[in-house]
Image (cartoon, helix red, strand yellow):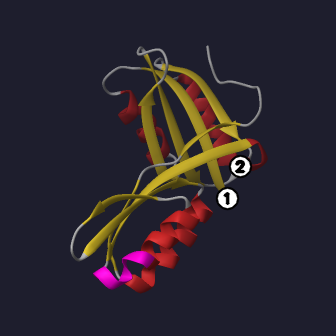
Amino acid sequence: MKHTISILVENHAGVLARVAGLFARRGFNIDSLAVGVTDDPKISRITIVADGNEYTLEQIEKQLNKLIDVIKVRHFEQSELLSRELVLIKVACQPAQRPELISIAEIAQAKISDITVNTMTLELSDSEPRLKTFEELLRPYGIKEVVRTGTIAMQKGGVSMKL
């Protein structure tokens, strides 16, 4: 089962390596990893999406809380989660196909990030299922390259993960 974990950490060199090391030692494969500073430049937020059972998740949370640089750990339930990824997809695009690709971009609410004589690069920020659908719509045109960020996530509603 996939789990989304958000971790507030002190913004120091080596913290990410220690956090990732915990996952590796427990055999908990990381599917997605995103790190960024928060509104406080001394604090970073690590968002990890990983696959594993409940017992392993519980053990990792306990181990994370023991790390000196870890401030707060939060596991999100799917029902309380608001998550997004960013994808850039470069597709083959002959001039005659441009209107079709522009139409797909408009329907998906994607942005055209780059266009050349023979390619078009589209950008979309959305949930993972919608990104997969978008990629499938573009596949018939000939995908040349796909780049995705890690998932970022926060809890829905008025609750905030702050100090």
Q: Which residue is mark 2?
A: 54
Q: Is residue 134 left or right of residue 12?
A: right
Q: Is residue 54 left or right of residue 5?
A: right
Residue 17 visible in image: yes
Q: Nearer the viewer, residue 64 or 124?
A: 124
Q: Position of residue 31 (x, y in %)?
A: 49, 55
* Amino acid found under the numbered disc labelled 2: Glu
Region rendered in magenta? 94-99
Q: Is residue 97 magenta?
A: yes
Q: Nearer the viewer, residue 90 or 16?
A: 90
Q: CB atoms at circles 2 and 1 under 8 Å apart?
A: yes
Residue 27 visible in image: no
Secondary structure beneath label 1: loop
Q: Is residue 49 magenta?
A: no
Q: Position of residue 110 (x, y in %)?
A: 49, 59
In this rendering, the label closer to the viewer, 2 or 1: 1
Q: Residue visible at 36% across and 35% down?
A: 17
Q: Residue furthest left?
A: 117
Q: Which residue is mark 1?
A: 1
Indicate whether 124 appears above or below 100: above
Quadrant of the rendered image containing residue 112: bottom left
* Amino acid found under the numbered disc labelled 1: Met
Q: Residue visible at 43% across and 40% down?
A: 20
Pointer 1 local density, CA inside 10 Å: few below 14, some 14–19, many at least 20: few
